[in-house]
Amino acid sequence: MFINILFKTFVITNLNKQIMNTNFNRVLTLFLVLVAQIFFAQQKSITGVVSDSSGPLPGVSVTIEGGTSGTETDFNGKYIIKASTGNILVFRYLGYKAVSKTVGNSNSINVSLKQDANVLDEIVVIGYGTTTKQSFTGTASVVSSENIDAKSVSNIAQALIGEASGVSVTRTNGRPGESATIRIRGFSSIEGNSDPLYVVDGIPFTGDINSINPNDIASTTILKDASATAIYGARGANGVVVLTTKRGKIGKSVIEFDFQTSMNRRTLPLYDLVDNEEQFMGLVYSGLKNSAELNGEADPSQFALDNLFADRGVAPLYNMWNVADGNALIDPSTGLVRSGVTRKYTPTNWADAGYRDGIRTEMNFKSSGGTEKTKHYFSLGYLNDEGFIANSNFDRYSTRLNVTTKPIDIIKISTNLDYSYSESNDATGYGGGNVTYMLDFIPTIYPLYLRDTDGAIVNNPNTGEPFYDFGDNRAGNARDFSSTYNGVGEAIYNINRTKKHNINGNINFVVDLLEGLTFESTYGVNVYSSVLDQTRNSLQGSQGVALGGTLFKRNITYMSQNFNQILRYNTKFGEDHNFDVLLAHESFVDTFEDFNLSKKGIVNLNPNAAGSPENYLDQNGVSTGSKNDSSLESYFTQANYNYDNKYYLTSTLRRDGSSRFLNNKWGTFWSVGAGWIVSEEDFLNSSDIVNYLKIKASYGVLGDQGNASFAGQGGFNIENLLGQPSLAPRPVVDPNITWETSNQFQTGVEFELFNGAIEADLDYYIKETSNLYVNKRLPPSTGDAIILTNDGELLNEGFEFNVTGNIVRSKDFRLSLTVNGEMFKNEITQMPIENATGNAKVVNIDGLYAQSLGSSIYDFYTKEWVGVNPENGDPQWTQHWVDENSDGEYTAGEGISDYMVYAAANPNSLIEERLTAVYSNATDKYVGKSAIPTVRGAFRLNTSYKNFTLSSQFAYSLGGFGYDSNYAVLMSNSKVGSTSYHTDIQNRWKNPGDVTDVPRLYSNENIRVNASSSRFITSSDYLSLNNIRLGYSIPTEYLSKVGLSSVNLWVSGDNLFLFTDRAGYNPTTSITGTSDRYTYNQISNYTLGVRIKF
Amino acid sequence: MKKIKYIITIIIAGVLLVSCNEDFLDQRPTSFLSFEDLAETALINPSIAEGNLRGIYNQLVTAGIGGTSAQEDFGHKSFDMISDLLSSDLAQVGARYNRFVALANLLSASDQTVNIPNYTAWRFYYRIINSANLIIASNGGNEAIPDSDEAKAIVGQAKTIRAFAYFYLTQYYAVKYDASAEILPLYINAGEPGKAKSTMGDIYDQIISDLNAAISLMDTFSRPNKASVDKNVAKGFLAYVYASMGQSDKNTLAKNLADDIINSGEFTMMNKDEVTGGFTQLSTPGWMWGFDITIANDLGLVSWHGFMDYYSYSYQAVGNYRGIDKGLYDQIDDNDIRKFQHGSPSGGWTPGAAPLIPARKFYNLDLVQFGQLPIEDDYVYMRVTEMYLLSAEMNAVEGNDAAAKIRLKQVLANRFDNAADYAYVDALTGQALVDEIVFQTKIEFIAEGKSYLLMKRRKLTNTRGSNHLNKVGTALSYDDPRLTFSIHQREITDNPNITEGNK
């Protein structure tokens, strides 16, 4: 008997209306009118028990091959499923080999599963679904949750450091609660977006990654190649990080509790500064004397002594010695402080006062379980992470509820819902008062507390507390370093606090329509709202006091909504042909709004009132606010085919429309991928050496929509001229700006040898990005200096490896070493067009780097340092020149300022080279160094003995260079007293004939010695210990008596050491290895933890 | 009824692949006015179009408008301050915080890799030129004469601004007036790619033609406030332009224009009280052009007051002092009110004491150190006293000593109580008279951005007084290459039609 069923339209109108503004007149409706064939075959109930060597297995998935129906085993390992004779039941369980059984006459099928050491059937979560490692034609790195759990971090981004080859994670900021920058496979864009897309539980995640408790994450997959990411089309070009959160399993409820506490401190090396006050004054004298000599003062030494504690030198207030002036302090014959000079006081060490050991406490409670119909996972987490700067901390309360239910057989509904509240106090200070900048770089002579002329600390008469020295002494006696600021005082007295609420949730709805055909729809939201309060107190600090206390308050709200509809069909034909396909539509919209106000004149000094605008008398500047909307609409389809589980093919097509572009909104992206399981072939099937071998390749075209919300839309800034609207032109735009596209090819091999003793993944890729977003430099005389446009092409080519050697695998003792790494090159293959000539631009200079045909985007282009002239101590750089007047020698005006530009315009000129002591005469050129390393990655050494486990992770980089701008500041010739000196300054040129690399020291003369040049380009090679962890599991025999199922104890450490070319230089804090004075260095963390399962 | 053995699947799913409304992807900015939105807004509120012109006046005071995030980048007045320091009439006295110290030590202007002032001035004035070109283009172009008085006034103002910007570029980036020297690219149409340098003569022709056109276009224009330019401001600039050419006939033209402005009666020269009264109000009758700063402009440290007013939240307040050259100060007559403009503000006001900052010329009236934030005191760009002294100077240069003395004494009458104190002027003739007018111009306009123009047009050599931090006693000639800005490396690199600087 056949029943024909006409399918009605199932219209999800309400949701559509809300988020998509559906125009029903223009609805392109695909009515699927399907005829179901419900046939009376010999269907019956099959029951059985699934077990492994230790007993029944709950939660094993039981499906009918080629069909959509399925079930899971209960806590006793039992299952019941309707099937027909001849159907094949497939039993799958994570970590076990899948087993297939054909339904025969019996109504009972019991199965025993065997653990799969290879875990080749490991489920891999990919875009819009899951697959197995074997059948996946793309390249993805699956990061084990064990490795993530081992690290004491507050978010998943930080946890990914070193976990996958080709994935570079940079912690630009060590502040508690800060995220990290992730770059997958090199630098594929110049001005576009280079961040990967996050996908959480199937929904593109645009909220705050910090709101997701890493403890709730069940699996982390990083999708890298076109085959893997093309299904995300517009947003997939930079890779995708796919996270799924934990879900309950059928069976006994599990209750889990873990607690860990750590100490956060600052242990990574610092720059070696001149930290002795007398030595420092010797340098002040030296700088002043040399400048006086250069300026032709009659008696340079006397000039220096007279000005030592004066306007040209150090403010007299900071004379901390029992002497009247410079003449009494310095012995001109040695240039050093006279012996016998005593101090009035010794300045407080700023770092001792401002840094501390912070305590980090983390607690998580989880409960999960389920029946055949409903499964749940619930968690509650608390994190309190104190930074090493006084008053800096990050608190987070997080909760999650994930529920899956099947109200009727053919419908499954899942929800994931999390809420978190965080509060971060970030006592970083303002501008020059940045705490780490002041504490790490303040010249050693400056006191923390305000001192009177006798050197005694000045107390606030009202409170009795000492005044901090803000260095703004009213008689022009100001401190030359960060005058008007005191980082420690600001950290203690001022507020810089963000309170944030996050809600992320989605609801997923799956209907089995027919054999092999399902419909699925997911609606998800990311919402956050934050309030920032920044106050300057009215008691201490020049600006706060002058204005009577200030408040800057900022409110941000963000909401994104994502809604998709997916139709999936899978089938099998013939013996070995498996085919599945999906067809989908997705829409995304988000809104960012902010509002800011500034007030001054605080009244109520109760600290709780400091964040309340009504507690201030006056406006302090204008109130501002903005709103940004963007939307994205997509259609996509994917088809997978495999033959005999040996040959796999995947193809994907996606069309995206983005609101970010004015005229050219739509782009089409696609990929194809193929995999061949060579080890399934007869000739390898029985090999003892090769257990598994897969070869794969893919090609695809992906897009990126960049960072600008309204690229292509020019206009006017709205200003106010005496109450009348005043419209100032905004920078020029390219109205035709559109998608940046990247063509990606990759091939790879995965293999396992000697029964799993060696496992490896090797990948090679070529990624060519065209229609590059470039900030094309325009001649400033045209009225605009930069235009963002699509032009030029960039090639990335790389090799990635991930090799694990399971060195010892005995019952009690295991030892393994995993090494991953990437080697890549980056090359500009086509330059943008120069408007004035219509030809490709020769060079586009971008800070320390220049883009030109054949170079990488991170090749250093600057002036070339050639050391110090031994005759006079002057700095020397290379100047290129051309003998224009043919007199055989260099004449003023014959120099070349920009090598590439000149050489391109004058291809036949003979370019010569000489030394110059004048910085502005030196030629900008490629200096042969690149920020891109030869190889970088991480390695992990893990071992276990009985119940003890020891794991460690190291990261490394070799062959690259970074610009150490901190060192440049410490080697400066700017005004004495305005900067600290690196101890290398002691090697400076002093007398004719001195051979050294450090020029003669001056004060405010010869100031370009430390301007950008190859002098400060430093090897960015490093080796760091990211994480080490020693764990112990209490044997179960002791636990069962007290009703516990497991107890783990551990000690661990994060960021314990860093070896670099120069102590203090940390190339890991920026993607180019450039150091920065305002960086909050990474925290080193020492943890003690326990996890208990009931 | 027979029990149905097999469950009949009756779930019906419809699949709807919905395309969104076509405006789903149409998002427009709300934090600025896009071209589309401007067009739509103008249909409802036509007067919005005048906002384009007002935008230029805002650009003149915007922080960072020179294309950098440096604190010394705050629009037209930042270059007034820089040029004052280069002229040496304004001394960099305090070293604290090192702002402007290298510039005053003459290490910056000659280095084409240094942003301040070489990049910022170039970027700023050309940005203003581009804004003016856009307005002129949208009103029919350079040759068109609009029908309505409103449109004429708009084009007249835009042309004045364009000329103003080119004039300052010629002063800053060319060593001296030389009609045949190639100095600057000339753009009078919006949207042109990088051009080669034009000669100084061509640039001057354009400036003069723009200003003459502007004077005629604004003939009946009555400006809403003195943030806008008008006919008299255009005449003032034209007078400066002619005066800078060093030609006898041009001097006469300059003098006539200056006299025209004085005779128009629109302005009244600042009196003794006013020149020691703070320079805070655009409404001051002696001001010809300026900017009325309000809280809406959101200016703080990065502003002229942030560098000059001890009683604002400023560098001046932390000891990064700029004050009158000591040599000049010492020459000021003790009975001259301007003697009391300069001194030391710490521990009460002491006129004449180091660091000689003009804290009783420019000051927030509350007189609280660090006190003013945000900035609400106004900017002055041009005042009518300049026209008196320019008229006197041009007369003296052309040998009309009597006329020169009349103008000069009109100024001095407002600076002295007793005419006997400046009776010595009557005895001056020839070069001595010119020198006296030069001196009076210098001390009248300390820190107002006039000294550099004066230095170049009179080809002066200024000697640094004892209170400068650097180069004390050094005599600096107007054509010293360290005083003229360098075309920044960025332009040379990014403009294929310009390959070298001007020096």
Image: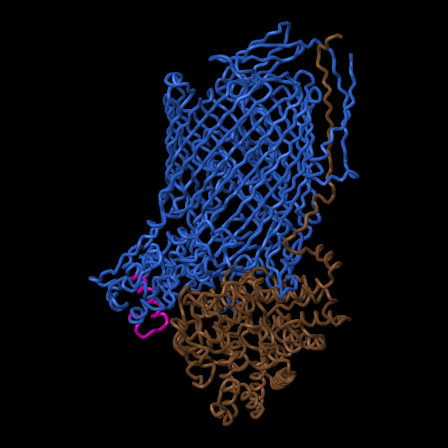
Chain colours: A blue, B brown
Pinpoint residue A938: horizontal percent, then vertical percent: 44, 36
Q: Residue furthest top?
A: A105
Pinpoint residue A578: horizontal percent, then vertical percent: 66, 21
Kindly indicate the quadrant of the structure image that contains residue A541. Answer: bottom left
**What's the magenta region?**
A281-301
Q: Is residue A569 above or below residue A723?
A: above
Pinpoint residue B457: horizontal percent, then vertical percent: 55, 80
The verdict on residue A291 being magenta is: yes
Can residue A548 be seen in this snapshot? yes
Pinpoint residue A768: horizontal percent, then vertical percent: 60, 42
> The N terminus of chain A appears in which quarter of the rendering?
top right
A517 displayed left or right of A93: right
Closer to us: A889 or A754: A754
A179 displayed left or right of B94: right
Q: Is residue A575 above or below residue A568?
A: above
B444 displayed left or right of B320: right
Can residue A995 be seen in this snapshot? no
Q: Residue furthest bottom?
A: B427
Question: Count of labels shown?
Answer: 0
Closer to us: B407 or A924: B407
Q: Is residue B422 above or below residue B133?
A: below
> The C terminus of chain A appears in which quarter of the rendering?
top left
The verdict on residue A12 being magenta is: no
Kindly indicate the quadrant of the structure image that contains residue A196. Answer: top right
**Secondary structure mainly formed by the magenta segment:** helix
